[in-house]
Amino acid sequence: MAEADIVTDRSGGAGFEYWVGLHPIDVLQPADMEELNEWYDTVHVPEVVDRNPGFSRGRRWQLVDPEPSGSEAPFWLAVYDIADQGDADGYLQRAAAGIAVSPPFTPPPPAWKKLEVRWRLLWRAFHSRGSCEDPQRLFLVGMDPMAGASTVERKDFDDFYSDVHVPEVMELLGFESGKRSRCHGTIAYPGDNGPEFCAAYESTDRTPMDRAGARGRLSEGPRAWQHRRVSWRLTYERLGGSRGPGGVTS
């Protein structure tokens, strides 16, 4: 891979993402699903982008392949891009204070009451490889280094993850991009604050992955990697369009 395809900022200045994960708590009929998706894609996502300073785009995803460890993962995931730390921190402050947007969001369909918010997380990217202009498949891995890892062991973990593991996963599983992020803020998450790190891999191909076949071909890594804690491995497929300011599909 060309050096130009690799972006590393160890200080964490390569952009932010705000995730909202929703999950059904009651049976959704096909008509409910259709109405919710139509409202979310064409009304709510554009309003979120328009009414939050610094939000530049929103994309929606639907869970297709959770592992058992990801049983608390949301069925739907909305991902919003935020370029500036000031805007990311401003959103966290407004959320903590319960400050609503103005004007208020358009009320959702009645089936919205059948959903619960499982995730509201803000991530700060610090390393990425490749690019995927129109992603259709998203593979997310949330994890922490070995508990009690020393400063040196954490550096070994980070170096291996960014420089060895991410490119191996991209090559073996057919992803065009791979990005590592650190949690920048937790607004909602079941049980605790969630993992410190997330890796997000994107592909234009929706073909199911053969993770089992790739597992034995991945490098072992240092001690802090071998004893890492993985919170979830989740595969999502794209829903709807990519909404920029004013509801424009980009």
Image (spheres, rainbow, N blue to C red):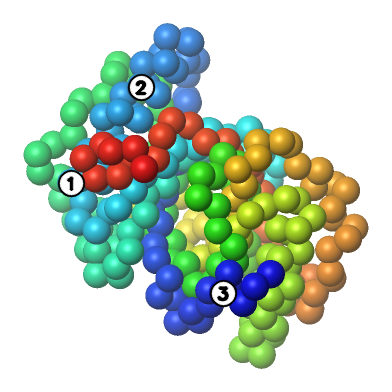
Q: Position of residue 109 (x, y in %)?
A: 29, 19
Q: Up-down: is 17 above or below 74? A: below
Find disc 2 in the rendering and name its residue. Answer: 38
Corner quadrant of residue 1: bottom right
Q: Position of residue 95 (x, y in %)?
A: 25, 53
**Residue ID at (33%, 59%):** 82
Q: Amino acid at mark 1?
A: Arg
Q: Up-down: is 57 above or below 125? A: above
Q: Measure the alpha-carbon separation of dots 1 and 2.
A: 19 Å
Task: Tell which of 113 and 62 is nearer to you.
Answer: 62
Find disc 3 in the rendering and name its residue. Answer: 4
Q: Is residue 208 left or right of residue 34?
A: right
First in residue order: circle 1 vs circle 2: 2
Q: Up-down: is 235 above or below 222? A: above
Quarter in which the C terminus is drawn: top left
Q: Measure the alpha-carbon separation of dots 3 and 2.
A: 38 Å
Q: Is residue 185 left or right of residue 237?
A: left
Q: Is residue 188 left or right of residue 211?
A: left
- Can residue 140 be seen here? The reply is no
Q: Amino acid at mark 3?
A: Ala
Q: Position of residue 178 (x, y in %)?
A: 61, 60
Label count reads 3
**Residue ID at (63%, 54%):** 176
Find disc 1 in the rendering and name its residue. Answer: 51
First in residue order: circle 1 vs circle 3: 3
